[in-house]
Image (cartoon, helix red, strand yellow):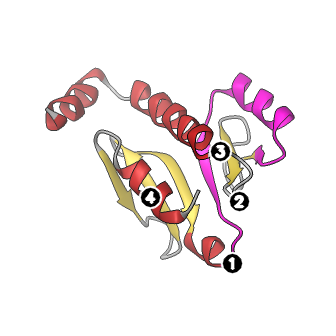
Amino acid sequence: MNLETFYEYCLSKKGVSEHFPFDEDTLVFKVGGKMFALSSLSQWEKNEQSANLKCDPDRAQELRAEYDEIQPGFHMSKVHWNTVALNGNLPDKFVKELIDHSYELVFKSLTKKIQNEIIELEN
């Protein structure tokens, strides 16, 4: 997956905004004010692209056991976040499923009021 595809796919989700809350390098995607994906732009430039994505703890363990490209979240809670190498070894469709899963976990954690506001914005 290239940066443009990653960027456009994350932004295509309902109610998503992009931020640089930590520094000028770390691109963060949020829904309802909560992070669901982040990536270092300088790592993309070095051809060491990856993204941190939220994941159900049990699924996170399974994915890490099955794929070398999926590791415990770098600089994140190792229980709830994975770092996914986007070096082309994982199919884009699968990476999009991981992004979807991360987004859905965060969206479902939002209050019903915020969820409804996001849904209404998109209609």
Residue 90, placed above or below residue 3: above
Q: Earlier in the sequence, mark 4 or mark 2?
A: 4
**Residue for badge 1:** 46
Question: Between marks 3 and 4, how big is the CA–CA gap?
Answer: 16 Å
- Circles 2 and 1: CB distance less than 8 Å? no
Q: Within 10 angstroms of label 1, few (less than 14), some, or many (20 or more) residues?
A: few
Amino acid of disc 4: Tyr
Amino acid of disc 3: Pro
Question: Quadrant location of residue 20?
Answer: bottom left
Question: Between marks 2 and 1, how big is the CA–CA gap?
Answer: 11 Å
**Residue for badge 4:** 7
Q: Nearer the viewer, mark 4 or mark 2?
A: 2
Q: Earlier in the sequence, mark 1 or mark 4?
A: 4
Q: Residue 108 versus residue 84: which sits nearer the camera?
A: 84
Quadrant into which the N terminus falls: bottom right
Q: Earlier in the sequence, mark 1 or mark 3?
A: 1
Amino acid of disc 1: Lys
Question: Between marks 1 and 4, how big is the CA–CA gap?
Answer: 17 Å
Question: Between marks 1 and 3, how big is the CA–CA gap?
Answer: 21 Å
